[in-house]
Image: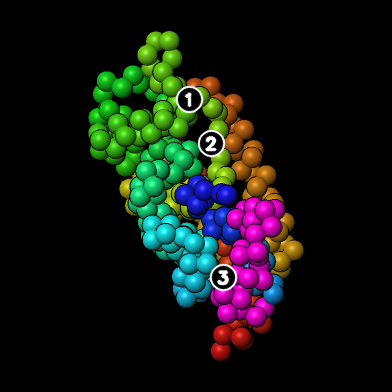
């Protein structure tokens, strides 16, 4: 039987739960029996929920928790997991993710540290990049913090080092100085995606600050508004992906870096399609 507290996506939990009980041929947990107890006539409801085509309502969450014989703590965690999975807005995602972390303590567990992701704070990535050329042995976190733009507190610099080391992204070399363990950091699962979204929002705020605080000679900010079809949108999107890869290679090949830069590329619609706009009226 899958451990509820090892999941943050309730659809994946239900998928494994139902598969395990189907394998064990337990009639109390068959799709038909669960639907009957929930008062749902649609035979494909659970399959649609697992596939992401349907969501659970608050009443259905409570009913399903009882049917799956969850205790009070498990039911609370399951409810938070459902709301986290189904949330559309980043603020809601963050709220329910924090609730998941808190509720896991009930079971004397914490979420996998690696799933918390290096993207959970924007300056983690900056500190990690600084260590590529800045010799730091942990003795003066205040100086490290002052190298970050905007400056971070000494406590934040210390925590960033501890966190990056715990994630296995940095380590001390033979001389006692921190160095990067890997050359690149990418995002992955659902929790990392949440932190990546927070990171992207934070770097957009940094971009706004840069326009006001960083001299024009030290930055490049441009905008372009255009009209495209879906096909040409995909072409431009593909070009941007190629550009990112080429720029990333330039950065990887750099052998004498002296500063950390943030490159944001935003490409999004600022109008609706005429047929979509008409349906809103």
- Residue 149 shows up from this direction: yes
Quadrant of the image for the C terminus?
bottom right
Q: How is the image coloured?
A: rainbow
Q: Residue at x 32, y 34 (%)?
A: 159
Q: Give the alpha-carbon distance from disc 1 to disc 2, as whole Å.
A: 10 Å
Query: Pointers 3 and 2 in contact (CB under 8 A)?
Result: no
Residue pointed to by mark 3: 55
**Which residues fall within the magenta stretch?**
15-42
Q: Which residue occupies the extreme bottom position in the image?
A: 281
Residue 30 belongs to magenta span: yes
The answer to whether one can see residue 215 in this image is: no
> Quick one: label 3, few (<14), some, or many (20+) residues within 10 Å?
some
Residue 108 to residue 236: above or below? above
Q: Which of the marked residues, 1 or 2, is nearer the chain's N terminus? A: 1
How far apart marks 3 and 2 lie (CA) works out to 33 Å
Q: Read off the residue under disc 2.
A: 185
Label annotation for residue 44: none
Residue that appears at 39% across and 47% down: 107
The percent position of residue 188, horizontal first and vertical second, equals 57, 45
Residue in the picture at 55% in, 43% down: 187
Which residue is labeled 1 in the image? Answer: 180
Q: Residues within 10 Å of mark 2 (few under 14, many from 20)?
A: few
Numbered disc 2: secondary structure? loop
- Sequence order check, earlier mark of 3 and 2: 3
């Amino acid at each position: 039987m899958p451990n509820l507290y090892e999941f943050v996506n309730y659809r994946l939990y239900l998928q494994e739960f139902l598969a395990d009980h189907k394998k064990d041929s337990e009639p109390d947990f068959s799709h038909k029996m669960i639907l009957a107890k929930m008062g749902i006539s649609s035979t494909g409801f659970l399959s649609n929920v697992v596939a992401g085509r349907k969501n659970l309502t608050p009443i259905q969450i409570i009913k399903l928790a009882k049917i799956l014989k969850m205790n009070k703590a498990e039911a609370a965690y399951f409810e938070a997991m459902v709301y986290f999975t189904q949330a559309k807005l980043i603020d809601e995602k963050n709220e329910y993710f924090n609730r998941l972390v808190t509720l896991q303590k009930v079971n004397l567990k914490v979420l996998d540290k690696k799933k918390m992701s290096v993207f959970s704070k924007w300056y983690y990535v900056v500190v990690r990049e600084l260590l590529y050329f800045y010799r730091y042995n942990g003795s003066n976190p205040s100086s490290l913090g002052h190298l970050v733009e905007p400056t971070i507190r000494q406590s934040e610099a210390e925590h960033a080092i501890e966190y990056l080391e715990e994630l296995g992204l940095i380590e001390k070399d033979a001389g006692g100085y921190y160095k990067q363990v890997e050359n690149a950091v990418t995002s992955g699962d659902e929790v990392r995606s949440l932190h990546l979204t927070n990171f992207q929002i934070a770097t957009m705020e940094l971009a706004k600050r840069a326009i006001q605080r960083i001299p024009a000679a030290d930055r490049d900010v441009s905008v372009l508004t255009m009209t495209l079809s879906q096909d040409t949108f995909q072409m431009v999107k593909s070009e941007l992906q190629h550009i990112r890869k080429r720029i990333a290679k330039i950065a990887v090949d750099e052998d004498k870096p002296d500063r950390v830069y943030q490159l944001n590329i935003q490409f999004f619609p600022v109008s609706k399609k005429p047929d979509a706009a008409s349906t809103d009226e």
